[in-house]
Amino acid sequence: TSFPASPPLGSLQKFSQSFSSVTSINIVHYLNTSSVQVQCYAATSPVILVSPEVVQIVDANTVYLEFGAAFSGEVVIIG
């Protein structure tokens, strides 16, 4: 069995967006790939890595996030 080659690390791109007091949000990242890594950080000091209740890859340019309560922070998407 052969597997498709992964892109070289130099070809990965990063997108980030801050948001405030949302329970859900669609993030349009324009990375043109569904193979993305999604990380969310709370707008706190110190910064805390958090896991949304739902992370849905909607299409090659959109990720949907859902939180259990109003949440403020930043999402970082790498793809």
Image: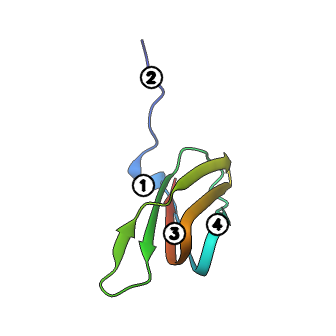
* Identity of the residue drawn at 45% across and 31% down: 5
Whether tag 2 and tag 4 are in contact, CB under 8 A, the answer is: no
The secondary structure type at the circle numbered 1 is: helix
Q: Position of residue 15 (x, y in %)?
A: 55, 67
Nearer the N terminus, badge 1 or badge 2?
A: 2
Left or right of 40 on screen, residue 60:
right
* Identity of the residue drawn at 48% across and 53% down: 11
Whether tag 3 and tag 2 are in contact, CB under 8 A, the answer is: no
Q: Nearer the viewer, residue 8 or 26?
A: 26
Quickly name the residue at label 3.
Answer: 75
CA neighbours of label 1 inside 10 A, class few (<14), some (14 to 19), many (20+) = few
Q: Which of labels 1 and 2 is toward the front?
A: 2
The secondary structure type at the circle numbered 2 is: loop
Quickly name the residue at label 4.
Answer: 24
Whether tag 1 and tag 3 are in contact, CB under 8 A, the answer is: no
Q: Position of residue 40 (x, y in %)?
A: 46, 67
Q: Which mark is residue 3?
A: 2
Nearer the N terminus, badge 1 or badge 3?
A: 1
Going by the numbered disc 2, the residue's amino acid type is: Phe
For the view shown, which residue lies furthest in the bottom direction? 45
Between the residue at mark 4 and the residue at mark 3, the CA separation in whole angstroms equals 12 Å
Q: Position of residue 57 (x, y in %)?
A: 62, 48
Left or right of 62 on screen, residue 16:
left
Left or right of 71 on screen, residue 22:
right
CA neighbours of label 4 inside 10 A, class few (<14), some (14 to 19), many (20+) = some
Nearer the N terminus, badge 4 or badge 3?
A: 4
Between the residue at mark 1 and the residue at mark 2, the CA separation in whole angstroms equals 20 Å
Going by the numbered disc 1, the residue's amino acid type is: Gly
Quickly name the residue at label 1.
Answer: 10
* Identity of the residue drawn at 33% across and 88% down: 45
